[in-house]
Amino acid sequence: MNSNRRSFLKMATAGTGGLLLSSMAGYASVGALNEAVQESQRKTKSHKQLFNMCNFAAPAIPVVRIGYVGIGGRGSGAVSRMTNIKNVEIKALCDIREEAVKANQQTLKSKGLPAAAEYFGSETAFKKMCDRDDIDLIYIATSWDWHTPIALYAMEHGKHVACEVPTAKTLEEAWQLVETSERTRKHCMQLENCCYDFFETLTINMAQQGLLGELVHGEGAYIHPLMEGMFTKPNKPGGYVYEGWRWKENQLNGNLYPTHGLGPVALAMEINRGDAFEYMTCMASNDFMMEQTAEKLIATGDPFYKQFGNKQYRGNMNTSLIRTYKGKTIMVQHDITSPRPYSRLHTLSGTKGFAQKYPEPGRITLGHSESSTPEEMMKFQELYTPEVVKHVADAAKVIGGHGGMDFIMDWRLIDCLRNGLALDMDVYDAAAWCAVTPLSVWSIANRSNSIDFPDFTGGQWKNNKRVDLTLRGGGNTTVVTR
């Protein structure tokens, strides 16, 4: 990657809604940013793959040895779920906090499993773990800033990577992940659990079977009323270390969390596998809530709340629109401050049918029918639930993780690695889905002008095969409820 492209990438990932924040220091103007974007598109389109990681099947690993980095709430859930899969060894636990490591060590003990090696006390403790030669997979659930650095280090040291969302925060990080995965031939899978939810996998399979016809439009969202947690004090002595990560992230005016809604739609539309994102535009409302909330808290006189003052917060509702090379459209929304019911707004609209979840229950209509009966929905589930979901559905509902989709995701990852099968999601998916955030920031800063997507596949999206949700010769990974 030459210096011109690196300069653009650093510029394109900063700035918000007409205001240049401190992260844009050193760059003259939004106009200079616009010029850099134009140069970037010429550079990114000339990317030559070192090796195509889409549909890549790495050598089989009969017993998958895992090291975990970041084992707070989400990470500890991942450790617990994985104890229910045979032919897995949890070799190492890493967190900056010793108490988190000890708590997860106790989880292993309670499940009758051997103790894992421990790494804690430093932000870079993960490096010693990745340096080991008895680990195959690094499972990352740290704060966002550390996702890419850990993933890069792990791949460079011969490990496959499974990383919580977002795998990359910037375009530069996305390119680094792609180039490193291609060069090392190590998987870099984004742990987008919503791609394994029951309704989403059902509709992806139905779309692949042609029941919805040609998909024309899709919609996804992350609408989640989290305002109360935005500015809260730490309330768990000896528990999580409060870093204000959610408040800090929400000073960036863009679509900050697109992958939950976008991922299932992208798989259904065969993005990076026959079609690709071509360009997008983004618009945000003003902030009508976060600054006002911060001011009220500051007025209480509690010194803890002073840090929230004199900040530029993102707009409450963000709407991104993406157009693909085949002329299809996708809407992706983000709002975690408004008092609205939770919604991921999974919508697929085709020439022969329609599917939508949120509000629940989800519904699917074929032809020009305007509704589907409960009996019809049960029939769709019986006929078109993918093989991989049927195989572990009962266990997943017991073991849990957002209703079971987390466990399905974990089991599928391990089954593919054990049997030497291609993963359902690869580094190009991670890069493209995460790129929505920095591109949305650029678009908002430029009055919602459109911006081209980088082609992380180097043009290979035209030839890549679509995701296959059958067992593909796998399915021999045993589940044991501990």
Image (tube, grey):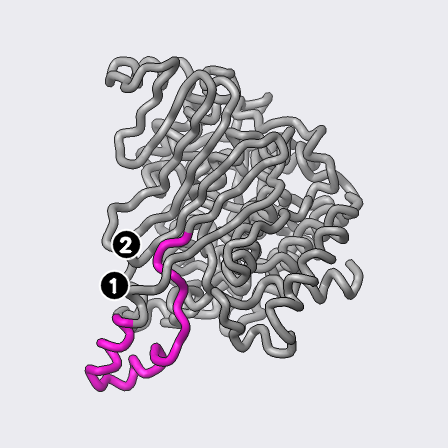
Q: Are marks 2 and 1 in contact (CB under 8 Å)?
A: yes
Amino acid identity at mark 1: Glu
In the depicted view, which residue is nearer to us: 112 or 464? 464
Residue in view at x 49 percent, y 71 percent: 19
Q: Residues within 10 Å of mark 2 (few under 14, many from 20)?
A: some
Name above or below for residue 205 compared with residue 436.
Answer: above
Give the residues drawn in magenta, as a range: 292-318
Q: Quadrant of the C terminus?
A: top left
Is residue 65 at all visible to an observer of this figure? Answer: no
Residue in view at x 37 percent, y 80 percent: 310
User: What mark, if any, has residue 225 been given in the picture?
Assistant: 2
Give the x, y percent position of residue 53: 69, 39
Task: Based on the picture, tell me whether residue 229 belongs to the magenta stretch.
Answer: no
Name above or below for residue 54 compared with residue 10.
Answer: above
User: What mark, if any, has residue 194 been given in the picture?
Assistant: none
What is the CA distance from the residue labelled 2 to the residue labelled 1? 8 Å
Task: Based on the picture, tell me whether residue 293 belongs to the magenta stretch.
Answer: yes
- Give the SS element for disc 1: helix
Give the x, y percent position of residue 68: 51, 55
Say whether residue 76 is left or right of residue 467: left
User: What mark, if any, has residue 228 been given in the picture?
Assistant: 1
Name above or below for residue 237 compared with residue 479.
Answer: below
Name above or below for residue 409 compared with residue 291.
Answer: above
